[in-house]
Image (cartoon, rainbow, N blue to C red):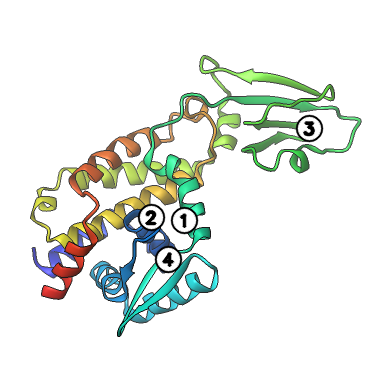
């Protein structure tokens, strides 16, 4: 595959969006180098980002930012610099991994909670770790159970058909539109036989972009039971296509990837 053809393939995955380089690198390290001793050489990082169309200067700035923010750390080996996730970066990545790589959760619960209108609102200060969306002055939908006699709590079951105005608050229209767009892009890539013609570097670069685009969508989507989300959210279709793409674009052996890059 020519460089021009590969650039078109990258564009088909990304659509009209331009990834933030530091965010793309977070995806890259989390996907390719999550193991504690895994490292990516500077040459490997630059080769992957350059193949996606990112300039070396932008990659260098993004690496500096991630080091400063304690996401990655550098290791000097002779004249070569290698990068790996810090414990902080690995912890954050591992925490997000089930949503990014796993199936849709089937054991989630959500509740409609009404607060006592005569008391000050205290929900957000007590339920920091929950996914919570306010749908009225004293009403929230949340994944945390209310354990106080000052709240009325109703379990939202799979059989309930929520009004559109509520489901749009649980998953806003901009996320619904983004999911439809990503589903269309993923389907086009799955139908593209060019995936089978890629070099190891190109397969790795496309994998990183695919993971990044799905990661961006699913981590923007509030973590409610997906049966409560509107039909206009196409996340389930995206997830199915995502796993099919990962099967065709497996994680490379890093040593083999470095050898391929050095060989040109």
The first of marks 2 and 3 along the sequence is 2
78 and 225: which is toward the camera: 78
Q: Quadrant of residue 153?
A: top right
The first of marks 3 and 1 along the sequence is 1
**Residue 139 visible, this angle:** yes
Local packing at callout 2 (Cα closer than 10 Å; few below 14, some 14-19, many 20+) is some
Determine whether 180 is above or below 54 in the image.
Answer: above
Q: Nearer the viewer, mark 3 or mark 4?
A: 4
Q: CA distance from mark 3 to mark 4?
A: 37 Å
Element at label 1: helix
Tag 1–tag 2 contact (CB < 8 Å): yes
Element at label 3: loop
Local packing at callout 1 (Cα closer than 10 Å; few below 14, some 14-19, many 20+) is many
The first of marks 3 and 4 along the sequence is 4
**Which of the image's four quarters has the N terminus?**
bottom left
Q: CA distance from mark 2 to mark 3?
A: 42 Å
Residue 9, horizontal then vertical, whole percent? 20, 58
According to the picture, the residue beneath numbered tag 1 turns out to be: 90
Local packing at callout 4 (Cα closer than 10 Å; few below 14, some 14-19, many 20+) is few
Determine whether 51 is above or below 137 in the image.
Answer: below
The first of marks 4 and 1 along the sequence is 4
Residue 97, horizontal then vertical, whole percent? 43, 45
8 and 35: which is toward the camera: 35
According to the picture, the residue beneath numbered tag 2 turns out to be: 34
Q: CA distance from mark 1 to mark 2?
A: 7 Å
Q: CA distance from mark 3 to mark 1?
A: 38 Å
According to the picture, the residue beneath numbered tag 4 turns out to be: 20
Determine whether 164 is above or below 61 in the image.
Answer: above
Q: Residue at x 46, y 77 (%)?
A: 64
The tag on residue 138 is 3
Determine whether 27 is above or below 44 in the image.
Answer: above
């Amino acid at each position: 595959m020519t460089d021009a053809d590969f650039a078109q393939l990258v564009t088909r995955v990304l659509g009209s969006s331009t990834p933030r380089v530091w965010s793309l690198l977070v995806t890259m390290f989390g996907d390719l180098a999550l193991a504690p001793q895994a490292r990516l050489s500077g040459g490997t990082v630059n080769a992957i980002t350059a193949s996606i169309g990112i300039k070396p200067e932008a990659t260098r700035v993004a690496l500096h930012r991630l080091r400063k923010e304690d996401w990655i750390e550098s290791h000097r080996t002779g004249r070569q610099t290698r990068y790996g996730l810090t414990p902080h970066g690995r912890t954050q990545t591992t925490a997000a991994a089930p949503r990014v790589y796993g199936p849709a959760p089937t054991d989630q619960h959500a509740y409609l909670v009404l607060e006592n209108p005569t008391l000050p609102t205290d929900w957000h200060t007590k339920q920091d770790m929950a996914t919570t969306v306010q749908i009225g002055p004293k009403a929230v939908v949340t994944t945390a159970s209310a354990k106080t006699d000052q709240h009325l709590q109703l379990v939202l079951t799979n059989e309930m058909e929520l009004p559109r105005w509520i489901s749009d608050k649980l998953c806003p229209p901009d996320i619904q539109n983004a999911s439809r767009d990503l589903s269309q892009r993923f389907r086009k890539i799955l139908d593209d036989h060019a995936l089978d013609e890629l070099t190891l570097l190109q397969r790795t670069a496309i994998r990183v972009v695919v993971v990044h685009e799905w990661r961006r969508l699913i981590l923007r989507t509030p973590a409610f039971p997906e049966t409560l989300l509107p039909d206009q959210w196409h996340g389930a279709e995206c997830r199915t296509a995502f796993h099919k793409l990962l099967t065709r674009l497996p994680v490379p052996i890093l040593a083999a990837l470095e050898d391929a890059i050095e060989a040109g």
